Image (cartoon, rainbow, N blue to C red):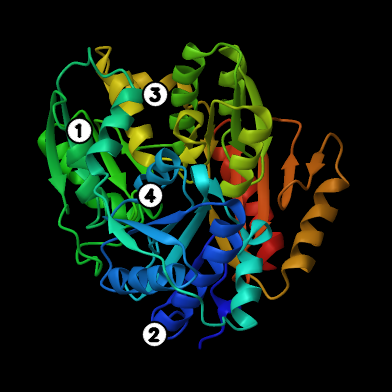
Amino acid sequence: MPDLSAVVKAYDIRGIVGEQLDATMVHDIGAAFAELVARSAGSPAVVIGYDMRDSSPGLAAAFAQGVTSRGVDVISIGLASTDMLYFASGQLGLPGAMFTASHNPARYNGIKLCRAGAAPIGQDSGLDKIRMAVEGGIEPGPGGGAVTERDMLADYAQYLRSLVDLSAIRPLRVVVDTGNGMGGYTVPAVVEGLPLSLIPLYFELDGNFPNHEANPLDPANLVDLQAAVREHGADLGLAFDGDADRCFVIDERGEPVSPSAITALVATRELATEPGATVIYNLITSQAVPEIVAEYGGRPVRTRVGHSFIKQRMAETGAIFGGEHSAHYYFRSFWRADSGMLAGLHVLAALGRQQRPLSALMAEFSRYAASGEINSTVDDQRARMALVRQRFAARDGIQLDELDGLTVRCPNGSWFNLRPSNTEPLLRLNVEARDTAAVEALRDEVLALVRGN
């Protein structure tokens, strides 16, 4: 069996199929999951979904065999987006497993696991226990579990539409690029009946991603969508990643809208339903987010990067909504899980209920210039981080915190965050300032220290 420690990540299990991840390993993970998560919580069944990758049905079946070998039933929902699996886990009150490698290339696959009610399972909250159980050897189980199939697409679509008032929106022309990922399966069902002229790009399910990677975080993968929005005179464009849990937005000019601006927009809409509610944002999100949340009477709460931290803080604070710079959006009404499709519906509702173009609507929520994430390969992450900290700590008016990596705030309002990658010899830099010139100056100064230039 391949080395399990190589594929257990901070938030999920992921690796190259046949080299790092195979059916035998996945069977044993399923058995351990049934024992440590399902049976320990008294759950009678586990719900399983999978994406369009060639390897996904077989791996999902191996996992199901592992679960049923422990006497626990399986409900298979078949093809699904990750947020559709979260919906099933929440609606059925069962722990779940989603087979996907999200935006990774075709040779990869993985498993996103959750407890009943779509509650997260991370490295510290269960994944390590599952890894250790598998590494210790899985004994044959008593068997007796059964597999049943259940189609939940229509229920998922109806539930999402129940959370956003789309009754009075004007007709909109929308280009949607699903990158041959699961959005091609879920988007038509969710938007059916809405006054939209839908222009589909790459809706054919194909885990080989023949047109471009299903990773909208890379600007190169937005080029086709941007061109189509301009060509068709569309009101906006939406781009989804491979498992359709993230949604990126393009305005009518073909320009990307910052996920931070989308976070702020959706936050104001959620706060309108519950004045004074808490909104979670991660520390790389634009400073505009906590400013706008406060201006709309909400309580902004800052947290580390990553879905398990966001969901934990949402549970602790009762937050109504949470957003990340990576275009993950979390909703209390959706079991605190993230849903790119639900965020997309909020954008459609906000745009469709007024007459301005999207660029004008979003102007209020886009207050600062930002660098985007810049990765640097380094030989010693700790030493480079320490050098940056030392140089900036000696200056007057500098504020430092180490909630997640190193965040440095300058007296002029500029700030940056420098974080080490957990899996690669990289440092990740994000810079924000009042204008582009200030961003570039601070970016270049930090990179010179990081890269030893």
Q: CA distance from mark 3 to mark 4?
A: 31 Å
Pointer 1 local density, CA inside 10 Å: few below 14, some 14–19, many at least 20: some
Secondary structure category for the residue under label 2: loop
Dot 1 lies on which element?
A: helix
* Viewer-closest of 223 and 30: 30
Q: Which mark is residue 191?
A: 1
User: Residue 18 bears which disc, if any?
Assistant: 2
Residue sitting at x 52%, y 62%: 12
Task: Classify 448 as above or below 191.
Answer: below
> Which is more foreground, mark 2 or mark 4?
4
Q: Is residue 303 left or right of residue 173?
A: right
- Residue 365 in percent (x, y) is at 47, 23
Relative to 43, residue 211 above or below: below
Amino acid marked by disc 4: Leu
Alpha carbon of mark 2 to alpha carbon of mark 4: how far?
25 Å
Residue hosting label 3? 362
Which residue, given by chain and number where applicable, does mark 4 sit on? 85
Looking at the image, is mark 3 or mark 4 nearer the viewer? 4
Query: Does residue 11 show up?
Result: no
